Amino acid sequence: MPKILIFIFIIHSLSVAEFGGSRASFHGFIMHEFMLEGVSCKVVEPKQAALGKPWIWRARFWGHQPQLDKELLNLGWHVVYCDVANLFGNPEAVRRWDIFYEFVTHKYGFNKRPVLEGMSRGGLIVYNWAKANPNKVSCIYGDAPVCDIKSWPGGKGKGKGGGKVWERCLRAYGLTDEAAHKFKGNPSDGLAPLAKAGVRLIHVVGDVDTVVPVAENTQIVEERYRKLGGTIKVIHKPEVGHHPHSLKNPKPLLDFILKAYQAYKK
């Protein structure tokens, strides 16, 4: 066997066999569960990795409404998770994701531009990490995403708010209730780096969501991103609230994501 083929085989083997930890099944695919610097992580490997090792990075609510993740696995994508629960996308959450990104891209050769998937409060970390790393993202899929902590868990608008979760959020950022009103570290703030980098956004929202109201979250991101010249698509679900997430048929999401990935494919 030529040396170059042996080298490629070794690299591929490393990508699927040496995460450590334990193994489980995720809808028939091998899932690696392991700790990385004290943080719980998961990597699900496809039966055969696609060229370039594309991957989607799930934020929060692992395994919930997995239809998109399963479709991507069938196409050779990896699906991953790095726990940032109760950090609400704060700098510590971004730091954890920085470490995980370096781990899977440098050691295992994953693509340098993952797709970020944020459901509900998962919107906080996907946007905050992406804004800190705009050239390391191909696109963002937000599903009823929280785009302003004042809306949720703050409940300062028309939404229900998160009750005591608001107190945990404030502690995570080192904010007082009063200071939170002037906070500019929300997903809806500072979108210019993403627009400049050409990161495409797609959101799925329920039009009667009373937990994460569209008008206080996705609508603001949409308006601001379009003004910046960015590409954003919003799929509205009439007469649907915060749940159920995703789409029964994920094809519109899949098509958008694959097109966005192809735009950066080397």
Image (cartoon, rainbow, N blue to C red):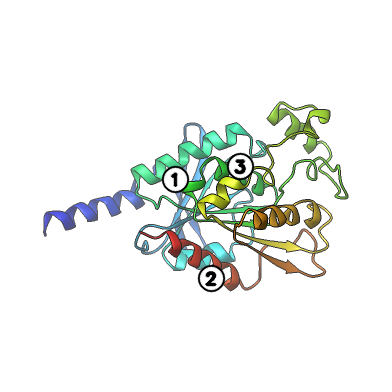
> How many angstroms separate mark 1 from mark 2 (CA)?
33 Å
Q: Residue 263, percent across and down?
A: 45, 63
Quarter residue 254 falls in = bottom right
Amino acid bearing label 3:
Asn
Image quadrant holding the C terminus, namely bottom left
The secondary element bearing badge 3 is classed as: helix
Q: Is residue 255 left or right of residue 109?
A: right
Q: Disc 1 vs disc 3: which is toward the camera?
A: 3
- Farthest residue, direction left: 2
> How many angstroms separate mark 2 from mark 3 (CA)?
25 Å
Label 2: how many Cα within 10 Å (few below 14, some 14–19, many 20+): few
Image quadrant holding the N terminus, namely bottom left
Asked if residue 158 is positioned above or below residue 48 in the image, the reply reads above
> How many angstroms separate mark 1 from mark 3 (CA)?
30 Å
Q: Please report whichever mark, 1 or 2, sits nearer to the chain's N-terminal start.
A: 1
CB atoms at circles 2 and 3 under 8 Å apart? no
Q: Nearer the viewer, residue 89 or 230?
A: 230
The residue that disc 3 covers is 128
Quarter residue 239 falls in = bottom right
* Residue drawn where x is 81% and y is 35% of the image: 181
Label 3: how many Cα within 10 Å (few below 14, some 14–19, many 20+): many
